[in-house]
Amino acid sequence: LSLGVLTESLSISVRISAMILLIVAAGTMFMGTFMANGGSKLIREFIETAGLGTTGMIVFFLLIVFLLGFVLDWTANVLITVPLFTPFIRQAGIDPVWVVAVQGLRILGASFLFVYSFGHLPGVFALTAGWGDILVAFLATFVVTRLAANPAYLKTREFLAFHIFGLLDFFGAIGSGLIARGTIPLRETIESTTALGELPLLLIPCFVVPLSICLHIIAIYQHLNARRANS
């Protein structure tokens, strides 16, 4: 490790961070403009008029996420849908057991390992994202069991830690993907992740990821509200 390599790595890291913050800022501005012009009110009125109920509302939101996945990058999809849908789902009073149980869908991340075994995904990404998703899905079964047996488990630090870990797993997957493609120059070999842009793998970043992030955030809100009500 030389000073030149360290300087180059820091420079690229700063540029990547700036790009990510610019995307986040643009997504926040879009959502702010959308809500300021009555977008959230329009959605609320549509849901109430249609009489979709809690289940119908979630299915409607998932359909929008699914359709946006065909025309938007998954990062843009997350930045648009999560801030828009989270308040509605949070106010719907969804059972925390259901919110955690859906994280079992993260077992689909095992498909990264399957595709990696055929050489279509780089190992640094597939192993990180795949095993991370499998671990989250595995832990979700224990969290659901504890929560169903004792609703007070919602207030525990273990419940909060599970959802924070689930969110951090996404950051690990993103980071490993950038390393694999050489965007973060920590490896000499550059490998392609284009398989993520093709069906059926495309469904994971464009559908499962926004859903999981949204539900993790809702679960954290539920935890904080339960702790606040108890104090």
Image (cartoon, rainbow, N blue to C red):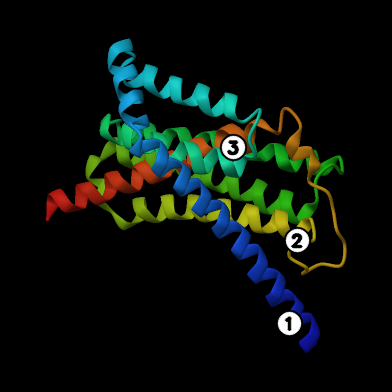
Marks 2/1: CA–CA distance: 15 Å
Q: Residue furthest front?
A: 37
User: How far apart are the two marked residues, 2 and 3, measured between alpha carbons?
Assistant: 27 Å
Q: CA distance from mark 1 to mark 3?
A: 39 Å
Residue drawn 22% across the image and 47% down it:
225
Which residue is depicted at the point 35% across and 34% down? 37
Q: Which mark is residue 140?
A: none
Q: Is residue 16 visible?
A: yes
Mark 2 or mark 1: whose residue is earlier in sequence: 1
Amino acid, disc 3: Ile
Q: Among all residues in the image, which is located at the extreme top?
A: 50
Coordinates of residue 24 in the picture (x, y in percent)? 52, 52
Q: Nearer the viewer, mark 1 or mark 3?
A: 1
Per the image, the residue denoted by label 1 is: 7
Q: Name the image quarter holding residue 59.
A: top left
Q: Considering the image in quadrants, where does the N terminus appear?
A: bottom right
